[in-house]
Every structure is written in C-alpha cells, then in structure tokens.
C-alpha cells in the first residue's frame, strides 16, 4: 500500500522495531474490538489509526458486514483493532449474522471499545448496546467520537451519563475524522495489551487479502454512487485477481443484485453508472496497491444470494441463526 497514506498513523521508530523483534520479552500483542451503533464512526476510526483505508466508509449505515482487522504497531506493541458491523435490531438473516459477528468479535477481544456518536447522544440503539455490553466479560473502554460536532458541556454530560451505566476503565474523547485524540487512545491501549509475540509482520496493516480489499473498495463506490436507489442486498465478489508480468493487477469482479431493476440502476443510463463506479474504484485501488490496476466489472442478478451459505462463508459470517 502507498506509504503516503500512512503518514498520519501512529509511528514506531526503527529502534523500537528492532528492540521488539530482537528481544521477544518486550513485545506485546492484543486485540481491541470496536463496537457501536451503525455510523458511529468505527470504520473511520480504524482507517485513521492504521493510516490507510482498510474498512469502507459511507454515509449509509451497516455497510461493514464482517469483522475487519487493522494492525497498528506502537513502540513494542502490536494492536489488532477489529472493526465490527454496527450493532442494531436485526430483521433479516444477513442482519442477524452481522450482529452475531459483532458480538463475537467483542467477546473474543482483550479490550472492548464502545464507539459513540457524541452528537446523537443516548439513542435507542446505544441504550440496547449498553445493556448488551453489561453481559459481556472483559475490560471496556468508552470512546466518544465526533467531539468536533458537540458542545463541551454536552460532551461532558454525555460522558458522565454513559460512565454511570457501564464499567469503563477509561474514557477517550476523539474526532476520528480530524485525528484528534487518536495518539492517546493508541498509546494507552499499547501499554495494556498482554505480553506476547506479534501476530502479523510489522508492515502488514490488515488481515484482508488483496482480493477482498478490492471487493470492498468497489462495494463502497456503489454505495456512494447509487446509495439512495439501491438497497443493502448487494454484494461484490472478486472472481479473479491476477498479477501480470509487468506488475500490473488485472481484477475481474461480479456485482450481485437481487432484481433486474437493481441491475439497471447499477448499470445506469447507457452504462454511465457502472463506468463511474469502475473509474472511482480503479483510481482508489491504484493508490492503495501502488500499481496500475485493470478492473473489469460485471453485474449479475442472483435473487437469493442473501440466503446462500456460500456467500456467508466468503464474508466470514455464520449462515445459521
């Protein structure tokens, strides 16, 4: 991935890197689950901490469908942040699988960080989240996000109210979009993750494969282009990811929709929508992969993909209720 995109990530000096590698007694590694209501800013926070995009960000809620891990190295510690799907009241099978994945990620982590959209305050979704967190074991952290959009007095009142309802070890007030407070959050976590070897090479920023990353980029561009007209039941699969002899990437992807009318929306009049989606996705992939990308998109109708166990396995979700 392009090094320029990592310039805002918490940095680690060459001395610290060598020290952690040479002396395993100093190395630490732990997992922090980011949980919250849809659109609380979990994906934006993850991307900001890692220093490059590993999770898609749109204004449409519930676009993160499975657990995505971003890796941050800070001094002797490697912190694996898990971006979980937004927790909401599930209605469909896919919704239930996403919520189950979120709670599973929380239960398996060393720390659970509750990300709160501060300007929204205590919503019904946040209220249910606080009740649910009370049943999950493990240390918890409160992260009040979007502090640039709320008055300080209201922010402090919100912090007091939420802390009174949960056993939080620490409260952080941040703006993931502007980068405020991130260094303190990462530094505090790095000191408290358990001793142990790193799980990933120091230059690896996510556990997503290139093929999955490419599919997520295209899915994001679809939501950005046609989010008001297309429903959630759309998915993107990378059918072929080939590294050519000259180093270019050739990527074939299929966009699956459930109806012919949705296919026409994605294609657009005279194919203008799909051309725009492909152009946006290709441009971002070139930046992320730091090489030329040849992207070919196809749109197909698969009416019942949201009830296909194979699709759930590919997304890392549990098909069963």
Image (tube, helix red, strand yellow):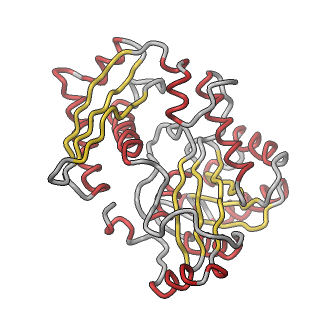
* Rendered residue at 63%/54% (across/down): 118
Figure disc tally: 0
Name the one closer to the observer, 118 or 37.
37
Residue 235 picture quarter:
top left
**Residue 218 in the image: x percent, y percent?**
34, 38
Report whether 142 appears left or right of 315.
Answer: right
Residue 3 picture quarter:
bottom left
**Residue 76 in the image: x percent, y percent?**
59, 79
Report whether 174 appears left or right of 291.
Answer: right
* Rendered residue at 24%/52% (across/down): 286
Report whether 16 appears left or right of 216.
Answer: right
* Rendered residue at 22%/42% (across/down): 250
* Rendered residue at 57%/71% (across/down): 181
Placement of 208 over or under 65, stated as above or below: below
Placement of 276 over or under 39, stated as above or below: above
**Residue 239 in the image: x percent, y percent?**
33, 32
Quadrant showing the C terminus: top right
Name the one closer to the observer, 295 or 6.
295
Residue 194 picture quarter:
bottom right
């Amino acid at each position: 991935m392009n090094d320029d995109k990592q310039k805002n990530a918490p940095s680690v000096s060459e001395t610290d890197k060598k020290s952690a590698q040479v002396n395993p007694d100093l190395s630490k590694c732990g997992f922090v689950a980011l949980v919250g209501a849809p659109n609380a800013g979990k994906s934006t926070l993850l991307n900001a901490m890692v220093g490059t995009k590993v999770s898609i960000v749109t204004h449409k809620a519930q676009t993160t469908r499975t657990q995505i891990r971003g890796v941050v190295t800070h001094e002797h510690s490697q912190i694996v942040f898990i971006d979980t799907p937004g927790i909401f009241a599930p209605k469909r099978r896919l919704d239930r699988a996403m919520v189950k994945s979120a709670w599973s990620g929380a239960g398996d982590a060393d720390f659970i960080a509750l990300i709160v959209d501060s300007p929204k305050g205590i919503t019904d979704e946040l209220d249910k989240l606080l009740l649910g967190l009370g049943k999950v074991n493990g240390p918890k952290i409160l992260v009040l996000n979007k502090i640039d959009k709320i008055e300080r007095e209201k922010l402090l009142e919100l912090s007091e109210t939420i802390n009174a309802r949960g056993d939080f070890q620490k409260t952080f007030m941040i703006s993931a979009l502007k980068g405020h407070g991130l260094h303190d959050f990462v530094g505090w976590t790095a000191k408290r993750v358990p001793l142990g070897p790193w799980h990933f090479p120091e230059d690896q920023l996510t556990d997503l494969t290139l093929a999955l990353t490419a599919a997520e980029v295209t899915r994001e561009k679809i939501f950005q282009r046609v989010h008001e007209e297309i429903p959630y039941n759309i998915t993107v699969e990378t059918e072929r990811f080939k590294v050519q002899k000259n180093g270019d990437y050739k990527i074939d992807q299929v966009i699956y929709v459930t109806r012919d009318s949705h296919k026409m929306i994605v294609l657009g009049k005279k194919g203008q929508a799909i051309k725009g989606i492909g152009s946006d996705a290709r441009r971002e992939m070139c930046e992320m992969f730091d090489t030329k990308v040849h992207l070919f998109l196809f749109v197909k109708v698969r009416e019942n993909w949201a009830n296909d166990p194979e699709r759930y396995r590919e997304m890392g979700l549990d098909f069963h209720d």
